[in-house]
Image (tube, rainbow, N blue to C red):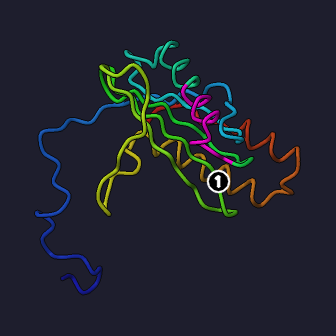
Amino acid sequence: MNSLSGLPADLSRFGNVEGYTHYLKSVTPGLPATAGGGLLKWYDISEEATPVTPETSALAQRFLAAETATGRLNLKGELGFVILHRCGGDFHFLLVSSWRNANEMWETVYAKTSEAPDFSLFALPGPHRATFCVWELAAVNHEREAFGRYLFSARDEVAKRVYLGDLYKGGA
């Protein structure tokens, strides 16, 4: 260990990413959605050459409405956001995040494969599991900062509108 930094002298065995070339994706805000009693900002994430299609977006919105109608998704008047991420080809994640207990982000994860006619709950096995990828974190970080500003505000009607209008758009 390096006594000055606390780091090992040799980092060669940590963080090795092989056989992967990273590339850019875009985060594009959409219209807000009501789901499960909550009000959610909407983000599409994809490569610019293969955007989320209007059909997939509409399917995702219908799916959230169905989850709400059946009671499987209950957001209890919460604010939050949705990320519809086209991960490659026709695989999509639908990540529904809401703010609970004053300052916690809660998430429900759905997915749709090219073979499936609709989205379904995505099983996340094990105690140490995936949360957000590097592209999704661009929107998540913006939302963390935006909700922090909301928490410091009067949290009135004006503040809610400011939060809902505070959207991220850009590269990820």
* In this rendering, position of residue 49 left or right of residue 146: left
Instruction: Using the rendered view, name the quadrant where residue 158 is placed.
Output: top right
Q: Is residue 114 above or below residue 64?
A: above
- Residue under circle 1? 99
| Span shown in magenta | 63-75
Residue 123 pos. (x, y %): 35, 46
- Amino acid at circle 1: Trp
Residue depicted at x 73% and y 39%:
164
Could you say whether the residue bearing mark 1 is in a helix, strand or loop? strand
Residue depicted at x 21% and y 82%:
2
As for residue 69 lying within the magenta part, the answer is yes
Residue farthest to the bottom?
3
Q: Is residue 50 above or below residue 143?
A: above
Magenta highlight: main SS: helix
Q: Is residue 13 above or below residue 107?
A: below
Q: Residues within 10 Å of mark 1 (few under 14, many from 20)?
A: some
* In this rendering, position of residue 113 left or right of residue 7: right
Residue depicted at x 56% and y 46%:
97
Instruction: Using the rendered view, name the quadrant where residue 15 is placed.
Output: bottom left
As for residue 169 lying within the magenta part, the answer is no
Residue 92 pos. (x, y %): 39, 28
Q: Nearer the viewer, residue 153 or 52?
A: 52
Q: Nearer the viewer, residue 13 or 96?
A: 96
